[in-house]
Image (cartoon, coloured by chain):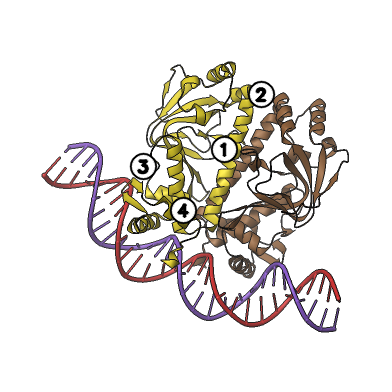
Chain colours: A yellow, B brown, C red, D purple
Amino acid sequence: MNAPSFSISHLKVACSNCNLRELCLPVGLSLADIEKLEELVATRKRVKRGESLFRAGDRFESLYAVRLGFLKSTVMSSDGREQVTGFHMAGELVGLDGISSETHSCDTVALEDTEVCVIPYERLEEVAAAVPMLRNHFHKVMSREIVREHGVMLLLGSMHAEERLAAFLLNLSQRFEARGYSRTEFVLRMTRAEIGSFLGLKLETVSRVLSRFAQDGLIEVNQKHVRIVNPDGLRAIVSGQAPACER
Amino acid sequence: MNAPSFSISHLKVACSNCNLRELCLPVGLSLADIEKLEELVATRKRVKRGESLFRAGDRFESLYAVRLGFLKSTVMSSDGREQVTGFHMAGELVGLDGISSETHSCDTVALEDTEVCVIPYERLEEVAAAVPMLRNHFHKVMSREIVREHGVMLLLGSMHAEERLAAFLLNLSQRFEARGYSRTEFVLRMTRAEIGSFLGLKLETVSRVLSRFAQDGLIEVNQKHVRIVNPDGLRAIVSGQAPACER
DNA sequence: GCACGAGGTTGACGTTCATCAAGGCTGCGC
DNA sequence: GCGCAGCCTTGATGAACGTCAACCTCGTGC
């Protein structure tokens, strides 16, 4: 509970120039609208690897748009079990959990040095009232998060370890691609234990399944570095085409 | 994909008289605001047991506030696995998944004869722009759904069968109580298979665990009728105080 | 260079839950 | 009444994953 050492930069924020525009913003905003938005996003905040952006119990004041870096969100049960609820990368909005009770209900921690745009929520509410397109976009972002979580529930509730990991790798791949990175080769920013927590598996199982995928020529793994060799093979696993028992 | 036989009632809808006000609406709305709201909620819709309110792929047009009855939502993977993502009762809002892509991404089906208030989404957006309190309330409802799903992820990702079922029963209990029903005695509207799907378990496991709870004097079960005898015992199970291996 | 620690891999073994299978209960139509 | 279908229960067995433990790898600080 010690105060994390954020550096807050008061640099001029310019959404209009931001290379994440297509991810963050609705298309077709007028210049005037974008100006309103730039007033909204007053500051940026840096979060060093290992530090938290916010913690469960913190008063909710702002949403955060990830500019660069990588974060995880976790919830904790009363008896101390931890569950990773998501990983966040550039262009994604975090903090939505806090709106409901004006208090954050999860911890969000940087897995590498990260920079976010701070979006004071009260102001967002005002701007959203005035700019229909932005309001609509905001609602879509929240709804998309609900739909994403439905997908995670499907994964956790009805998939085997191999299917979960294949789905996880493909999801990462697709998100990296959408950000202009390679979809076949990337670095896992999280540990095996964190992947396991997210997927409802133990770290040993994650490690074993990754090794098996590598053995089967689906991927190459070297510690955190992953190369997807046979994406269709992974897709086949996700859709139950190739359950473990058939191989 | 045949058209379901809804009966749409054009009765005057009166939120101001609705006994679900405290669940549905923010406190402290002015009379003028409530009038705007009543224009918004134009119609009601009845859905018979077994029929669907909407299906994945349907164009999204409205949200629905449950007036009475009981529904489930399910998502389906490409290979046909089904996952129950939630059960809905009076006072809850369903259909939020559709906002993101203007298409519903889950099926929502009545588990008993059900009546909902239809809330055309376009109009909701307008009214929300004009009525700050309602806007804020709407955002909180969406956020609450996100937080709820975090809880389900925790359950699916890190709890044992007994813990899941204990948590499930307590959750139902608490929701019934909030609606003025008994918190100790209620009827499960869903089958064992549906409970299992929601909790990531098979129906046999659900049945076995319920029997074990009954044997241990925690509950009484008779088919769909459940009486919670020892809620603290259930709570102890949820918080890992009493794992199966200790008994 | 070396020691240390965090994170990762791999193997042996055990537990939990799924699977398969048989049978019971309840409500409904005839 | 009877038969049937849907749902539920219970038992026997096995697979998938967790647990425990040993060891390896890499990066860091001294």
Q: Give the alpha-carbon distance from disc 1 to disc 4, as whole Å.
A: 31 Å
Q: Are the residues under badges 1 and 2 in a single subunit?
A: yes
Q: Badge 2: few (under 14), some or many (20 or more) residues near its Cα, within 10 Å? A: many
Q: Give the alpha-carbon distance from disc 1 to disc 2, as whole Å.
A: 21 Å
Mark 4 vs mark 2: give the one in front. Answer: 4
**The residue tagged with tag 3: helix, strand or loop?**
strand
> For residue A97, which numbered disc appears in the image?
1
Mark 4 vs mark 3: give the one in front. Answer: 4
Q: Give the alpha-carbon distance from disc 4 to disc 3, as whole Å.
A: 18 Å
Amino acid type, callout 2? Ala
Residue under pointer 2? A129
Q: Are the residues under badges 2 and 3 in a single subunit?
A: yes
Q: Are the residues under badges 3 and 1 in a single subunit?
A: yes
Residue under pointer 3? A186
Name the residue located 85 percent from the left edge and 37 percent from the top edge: B14
Residue under pointer 4? A235
Mark with earlier residue (2, 3)? 2
Mark with earlier residue (1, 4)? 1
Q: Are the residues under badges 1 and 4 in a single subunit?
A: yes
Amino acid type, callout 4? Arg
Q: Position of residue B162 (x, y in %)?
A: 56, 62
Q: Does residue A199 appear to the left or right of A30 in the view shown?
A: left
Is there any visible trace of residue A187 in the rendered image? no
Q: Quadrant of the C terminus of chain A?
A: bottom left
Name the residue located 76 percent from the left edge and 38 percent from the top edge: B119
